[in-house]
Amino acid sequence: MKESQALIQRVRRVNDTHQHITMSVDASLLQLKAGQAMLRRPDANGWQPYLPELWFPVALEKDMLTVERPLSEHYEPGAVVTLAGLLGKPFRFRRTLRNVLLIAHDTAPTPLLMPVQPLLNSKVNVTLLLLGTAADYQTTHLPEEVEIIKGGADFDWPNKLTTIGWADQVFVTVSPSSEMSSFRKFWKIFSELRSDAPAGYIFGVFQMPMPCGVGACDACLVKCRSGEVAACIDGPSLDLTDVRMD
Ligand code: FES
């Protein structure tokens, strides 16, 4: 994992809660694929977080990387941030894919957004399901081809059976404060309402603190049927059919 400095070029508010920060970055970060992340490290200018922050890009164009951050954070063009990456593995999309379901529950859908436009370009249908506080996330900046469905925090939404039956693959992100219990709930819903939920069908995108990002500190270990895996190395998206839900 290489640490480098990124220069903020543009800051654009995209809705009432989030902004897009476009940065020129080191060439090593331009290899990033949808599903991979970066760690924002303490800066030389004195910014000192309690833990490195997990940053998920939402777009990569030429030599510019764009991340989505809450509006409550302050960024200005010309500022420098320290990033470390690449973290984890890309999303494992099936080769033959028609319909993808992206779900955010009680958290912003940011970790799921980078593949949206490439999927649409490949004629894959994309539905974004926003549940609980995620329903407050305004979506007018997303491509209009994306189907948006909203629901409550109770894991219920309109046309649930149809949505689940229609999806070839599902990627879920949830509030880090209740990550395993929420993933367990989604796994139960999908495995009960769908007769076949094979390996590679439903993935959880883990967002727990990842202090080292290189598999050295054990902070991000997830129990899987094959043993414990580090989400910073094998994730952040992990196949929920493999994750131990007990
Ligand atoms: S963050 Fe240290 S092992 Fe994953």
Image: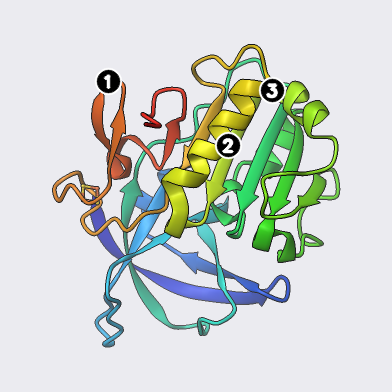
Residue at 46% across / 65% down in the picture?
Answer: 24
**Alpha carbon of mark 1 to alpha carbon of mark 2: how far?**
21 Å
> How many residues crowd mark 3 within 10 Å: few (<14), some (14–19), many (20+)?
few
Q: Is residue 53 above or below residue 204?
A: below
Residue at 43% across / 73% down in the picture?
Answer: 7
**Alpha carbon of mark 1 to alpha carbon of mark 3: how far?**
26 Å
Residue at 78% across / 44% down in the picture?
Answer: 157
Q: Which residue is mark 1?
A: 226
- Residue mark closest to the camera, 1 vs 2: 2
Residue 186 badge: 2
Mark 1 or mark 3, which has the lower sequence index? 3
Q: Secondary structure at mark 2?
A: helix
> How many residues crowd mark 2 within 10 Å: few (<14), some (14–19), many (20+)?
many
Q: Is residue 44 visible?
A: yes
Q: Residue furthest left?
A: 216
Residue 38 rendering spot, x and y as whole percentages: 37, 55
24 sits left or right of 137 in the view: left
Residue 238 rendering spot, x and y as whole percentages: 42, 33
7 sits left or right of 46 in the view: right
- Name the kind of residue labelled 2 in the image: Phe
Mark 1 or mark 2, which has the lower sequence index? 2
Q: Secondary structure at mark 3?
A: helix
Q: Which residue is mark 3?
A: 193
Residue 233 rendering spot, x and y as whole percentages: 28, 39
Quarter in which the C terminus is drawn: top left
Instruction: Write down the quadrant of residue 124 in the picture.
Output: top right
Disc 1 CB within 8 Å of nearest ligand 1 atom:
no
Residue at 62% across / 72% down in the picture?
Answer: 19
Residue 144 rendering spot, x and y as whole percentages: 85, 49
- Residue nearest the viewer, comparing 11 with 9: 11
